[in-house]
Structures are given as structure tokens and as C-alpha cells.
Image (cartoon, rainbow, N blue to C red):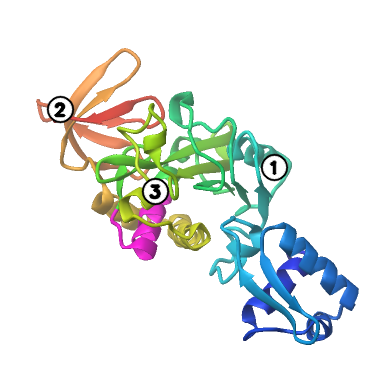
Amino acid sequence: MRPVNRGEEVLLLLKGADGFISGEKIASVLNISRTAVWKQISRLRKEGFQIEAHPRMGYSLVLSPDRLLPSEIRDGIKTSLIGSEIFYYEKIESTNAIAKNLAMNGAKEGTLVIAEEQTRGRGRLDRDWLSPANSNILMSLIFRPNLQAAKAFSMIMLTSVAIVKAIQVTTSLVAQIKWPNDIYLYNKKLGGILTEFNAEQDRVNFVVIGVGLNVNFDPCLYPEIKDTATSLKKVMGKEVKRAVLLRSILEEIERGYSDFSKGRISQIRSEWDHYSLVTGKHIRIHSLDNVEEGIAESIDDDGCLILRDINGNTKRILSGDVSLRVSE
């Protein structure tokens, strides 16, 4: 059971109040002193919440900050496993690095690591991941699935499906999945997924899923990505409430992980095909010293791409050691 967080309890009362709520009532409901209430109000203000105080009326929440604070993530979220524990950071090197360390030290399944800024964020093949502070979603989740090591990359499949579904639910935009781990919108990169795992022989101890999603920043400010990347704000012309989108992503991941754990892989794979940018298209795949071409037919239950070459032969392409270009 998660320990009581008085700040979150005070915040929930403020959000639920129709206007002002007295410090006396807050103290009574939470069975704490008026001094304790004042301390929690002060802490919430330091976190960026605008709270008005009136000598006779009490406190009123005026504005919540656009920050992915645990209290904002938990506010109304419909999950029981994903996000049950949240580690929040203003600025760190990498959410995946923190999550792997937590997992090695016994952190439970569903633990979320979230950051406003990363100084050493990275994607596949050790590529840098650019993201200004307080603009995007940068997170990692810990899973402990009953899974063979060879099937660990199938976790990318369920996560990518969850992300595009959440984007559609919250913004009505239909993003697409570019195998193996990218989220695209109007043929430009919107986000990426990085999967890392720890295993012994053929048994997975834990899987860490890292997600970087461009929400409220302008890629045009960065010459190295301005022609290839996009963001939800750039497409919509307005800012997106990151906490709302994040809650939806976590809820969709929990639903997908439940299906995954129950063996309903075909359903997830069908949804992946529905959102796929490459299925049915002629593609070119570059590995370290090889180039292959063919028609992308689908993915299998392990998340491997099924490629049909010009001779009609099919081949499984493993994720993690190839890059992909859609042929013109």
C-alpha cells in the first residue's frame, strides 16, 4: 500500500472544493493540525500551484502548474498497477538509468520514473534524444513479466499501441507506429520507445520501457531534427495538457499489459497492424553491414518484423539491430 501523502490529500480537497475551503475543514477531514495544513499549502505553492488564501474563507486552488508531478498524475487515473509508485525528477541524466537501478534493487512492477528534463536521454543505437525542460513526456516503467528473454522486445509492441491509442483518445490525432520503436505523425517522428531488460539464462527478471514523446515543444528550433521531427503542439497549434495525456497513456498500457499477460497477443498485434506505418509497404532495412528490401507483412508475437523479399520468401527481422527506411 502506498504511504499517505498529505500534500496530495490537501490538493485533492482543494480540487474538489467549490471555491474556497477552510483550513479548519481540511484539518478536520485529514485529522491533522492547522499548522500542518499551512505547511502543505506552502509546499504545494513551491511546486507551482497557485493557491489563494483568504482570512475568513480559507484556501482556493487558482491554477495547477504544467508539471508532471505525482499528484497531477494520480489525479483521477484509472490504473491499479501502472504508476502505483512514482519517482519524479526535475532534471536527471536518464529515466531508464534510474528505473534500471530501482529494478535491480527490488522496485515493484508498475513503478514509474518521470522527469521534466533529461541531460543524457537516448534512443535506439545510442542516439541522443533532444527534449527541452517541462515540455514533453519523458518516462520509464518497470515490468516483471513471466517472459522468455527472446520475447522481451514484444513489450515494445504493446507500449507503442498504447501510446497511439492514448493520443487518439486525448487529441483525436491518429499517430502511427514505425517498426520497431518509433511513433510518427504525418510522416515525422513524434516519439520513441527504448526497451532494456535484465535476464538470467532464459528468464527475464525485469523489463524497463522508456518513452520519449514530443508534446509541447517546437522541433524547428533544433537544426538537427527540424526536418524529421514533430510535436503535438506543432500539429494542433496549441498546447496539450501533458498530465491528461500521460494518464491516458498509463491507462492504455495497463490494459495492454493485462491482455499481454493473459496471452492475448493476437489482439495487440492486430491493433499494431491497424496503426502501422509500414505494413503492406515496400521497405528497405539497413543493418550494420547489410541492406534488405521487401514488403513488410506484419510482426509476429515476439515483435519481430515479417519481411517478404522479391522471391516471395519471408524472413523474421529482429528488433534492436536494424534501422528502417520506407522506400519512396
Q: Which mark is residue 102?
A: 1
Q: Which mark is residue 309?
A: 2
Q: Amino acid at mark 1?
A: Leu
The quadrant the C terminus occupies is: top left
| Gap in angstroms between the C-alphas marked 2 and 1 | 43 Å
The residue located at (74%, 58%) in the rendering is 46
Q: Residues within 10 Å of mark 1 (few under 14, many from 20)?
A: some
Which residues lie in the magenta part? 158-174
Compared to residue 227, the image places residue 31 above or below, namely below
**SS category of the residue bearing label 2:** loop
Q: Name which quarter of the figure residue 68 lies in.
A: bottom right
Q: Residues within 10 Å of mark 3 (few under 14, many from 20)?
A: many
Please tell me which of labels 2 and 3 falls first in the chain.
3
Residue assigned mark 3: 160
The quadrant the N terminus occupies is: bottom right
| Left or right of 274 in this view: 220 | right
Is residue 313 visible in the rendered image? The answer is yes
Q: Amino acid at mark 2?
A: Asp
Compared to residue 105, the image places residue 60 above or below, namely below
The residue located at (41%, 29%) in the rendering is 320
Secondary structure predominantly adopted by residues drawn in magenta: helix
Dots 3, 1 in contact, CB < 8 A: no
Measuring from the top left, give residue 291's x and y in whole percent. 24, 18
| Left or right of 306 in this view: 215 | right
Query: Which mark lies nearer to you, 2 or 1?
Result: 1
Q: Is residue 160 magenta?
A: yes
Please tell me which of labels 3 and 1 falls first in the chain.
1
